[in-house]
Amino acid sequence: MSRPHTTCRVVSCRPVYTVLVTLLVQLDASNKREVEVRKLKRELEETQAQRDSQMAALRKKSQEAINELNEQIDQLQKAKLKYLHRLLLSHTIGLAPAGDRAVSCVCDFLCLCVCESAL
């Protein structure tokens, strides 16, 4: 069976043109958004790199301060031990004033520490 012959209608180009223009506008807007997203991503990466660099510098500075404080603590402990040793020696050889309770207490404490460490 053959189809019945239909007449060709002339289609207006106006709707097709409107659709194409709309698509081009949407494509342009999409491209602009992609460019903006790439720009923002690049800025974010730069900011993260700067933050990482600053954090590393702060960690280094903090560690240096901690090391310096630990060194000061060690020096103070050495000075304290040296002072207590001198105090014990002065008490032992009788240079400390007799009846000085502070000297006596420190000497008793040091003797106790020495005796315990000898065990």
Image: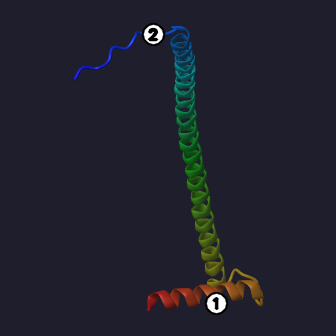
Q: Is residue 16 above or below residue 52?
A: above
Question: What residue do we see at 52% from left, 25% from top?
Answer: 34
* Numbered tag placed on residue 46 in the rendering: none
Residue nearer the viewer, 79 or 10? 10
- The secondary structure type at the circle numbered 2 is loop
Question: What residue do we see at 77% from left, 90% from top?
Answer: 99
Give the percent coordinates (x, y) of residue 89.
Answer: 61, 79
N-term mark: 2 or 1: 2
For label 2, count other residues whose C-alpha is less than 10 Å away and answer few (under 14), some (14-19) or many (20+).
few
Q: Is residue 87 left or right of residue 1?
A: right
Q: Is residue 32 above or below residue 114?
A: above
Residue nearer the viewer, 76 or 110? 76
Q: Is residue 33 above or below residue 104?
A: above
Question: What residue do we see at 56% from left, 48% from top?
Answer: 59
Q: Residue type at mark 2?
A: Arg
Residue nearer the viewer, 30 or 1? 1
Quadrant of the image occupied by residue 46: top right
Outermost residue toward the left in this view: 1
Q: Mark 1 highlights which residue?
A: 108
Q: Quadrant of the C terminus?
A: bottom left
Question: What residue do we see at 48% from left, 10% from top?
Answer: 11
* Numbered tag placed on residue 9 in the rendering: 2
Give the percent coordinates (x, y) of residue 101.
Answer: 76, 88
Give the percent coordinates (x, y) of residue 96.
Answer: 72, 81
- The secondary structure type at the circle numbered 1 is helix
